[in-house]
Image (cartoon, rainbow, N blue to C red):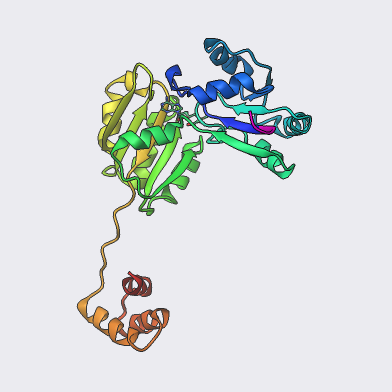
């Protein structure tokens, strides 16, 4: 094992066969494992016959735990951070600890593996050239709709995490804020027995889910296609004026003047110029 460091170790999101040999080796060799829930991770370690010293690190004790872990690193020990499932830090605790350890001058090494949203995206058939990972939406519907409305014009793929308790309500709010014709992929229980990956419009997916209560159970990644690019409403005349002005002026100025002359939208004119 290399110099004392904090390893950020990804663990399975369902199928225990997804714990990599390297992750197993590191979990077996470190002096201490910092786990979101020691009982939960204890079971994983037991399955792999790994004996380890565990301490809990969660949202409420991360700061105190960071100083304890830095002391252990300073004493020459190595530490692994795990969460209940998938990659720590991704909608999970650990950010405060990783930052503190780095600020204290110690190395942090990732031990990559499962991450629910990456797994879902890889099998979704949704555009993946540009995407935003949003994670969990607010629990209350009003705040959720507001958050979704703020995302409505985004053209990249949008990725959300959702739980069994809120999946239907969240999909309904998405249909309200984004339109029920927007395409969505719902990835449920990935790598587990009841894995289901279903793609359709928001309206159709809600109906499909309401028709079968089993489809509302488990853990979900929701992947929503981005908004369609806005069709330009510029007339040929406006474009001609714009292009004449742009031959003499910088794009911003040309767009502003063309907007004054033709009454067309300044932003659209500018977009037309910069492509
Ligand atoms: N750190 C984890 C990761 O790397 O994906 C995510 C932790 S977050 C607290 C838990 C959420 O991840 C669940 O509510 C669900 O949205 C998603 N998730 C985790 N496991 C999943 C699975 N097997 N199938 C679908 N979604 C899953």
Q: Is 184 rendered above or below residue 30? A: below
Residue at the far front: name it: 2
Q: How many marks?
A: 0
Residue at the far bottom: name it: 248
Is residue 172 in sight in this rendering?
A: no
Residue 85 vs residue 259, the one in the foreground? 85
Name the quarter where the C terminus is drawn. bottom left
Judge left or right: residue 100 versus residue 85.
right
> Horizontal and vertical percent for residue 53?
68, 17
Q: Is 181 rendered above or below residue 60? A: below
Residue 46 part of the magenta segment: no
> Horizontal and vertical percent for residue 15?
42, 19
Judge left or right: residue 136 versus residue 195.
right
Q: Is 97 rendered above or below residue 164? A: below
Point out the stretch of residues depicted in magenta. 1-5
Q: Main secondary structure of the magenta part?
A: loop
Is residue 193 in sight in this rendering?
A: yes
> Horizontal and vertical percent for residue 124?
31, 36
Residue shown at 28% from the left, 39% from the top: 125
Residue 3 part of the magenta segment: yes
> Horizontal and vertical percent for residue 258?
33, 82
Residue shown at 30% from the left, 58% from the top: 229
Residue shown at 42% from the left, 50% from the top: 151
Residue 221 vs residue 192, the one in the foreground? 192
Name the quarter where the N terminus is drawn. top right
Question: Residue 29 occupies which quadrant of the picture?
Answer: top right
Question: Residue 217 occupies which quadrant of the picture?
Answer: top left
């Amino acid at each position: 094992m290399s110099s004392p460091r904090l390893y950020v170790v990804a663990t399975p999101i369902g199928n225990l066969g997804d714990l990599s040999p390297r992750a197993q080796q590191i979990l077996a060799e470190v002096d201490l494992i910092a786990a979101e829930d020691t009982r939960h991770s204890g079971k994983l370690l037991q399955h792999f016959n790994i004996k380890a010293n565990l301490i809990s690190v969660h949202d409420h004790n991360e700061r105190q735990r960071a100083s304890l872990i830095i002391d252990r690193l300073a004493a020459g020990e190595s530490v692994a951070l795990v969460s209940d499932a998938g990659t720590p830090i991704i909608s999970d605790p650990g950010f405060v600890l990783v930052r503190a350890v780095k600020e204290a001058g110690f190395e942090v090494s990732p031990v990559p593996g499962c991450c629910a949203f990456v797994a879902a995206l890889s099998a979704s058939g949704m555009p993946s050239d540009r995407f935003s990972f949003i994670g969990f939406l607010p629990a209350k519907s009003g705040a959720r709709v507001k958050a979704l409305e703020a995302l409505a014009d985004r053209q990249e793929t949008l990725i959300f995490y959702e739980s069994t308790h809120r999946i239907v309500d969240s999909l309904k709010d998405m249909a309200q804020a984004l339109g029920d014709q927007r395409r969505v992929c719902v990835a449920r229980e990935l790598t587990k027995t009841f894995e289901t990956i279903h793609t359709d419009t928001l309206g159709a997916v809600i109906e499909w889910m309401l028709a079968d209560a089993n489809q509302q159970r488990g853990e979900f990644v929701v992947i929503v296609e981005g908004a369609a690019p806005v069709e330009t409403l510029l007339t040929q005349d406006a474009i001609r004026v714009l292009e004449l002005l742009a031959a003499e002026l910088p794009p911003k100025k040309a767009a502003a003047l063309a907007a004054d002359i033709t009454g067309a939208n300044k932003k659209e004119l500018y977009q037309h110029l910069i492509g």
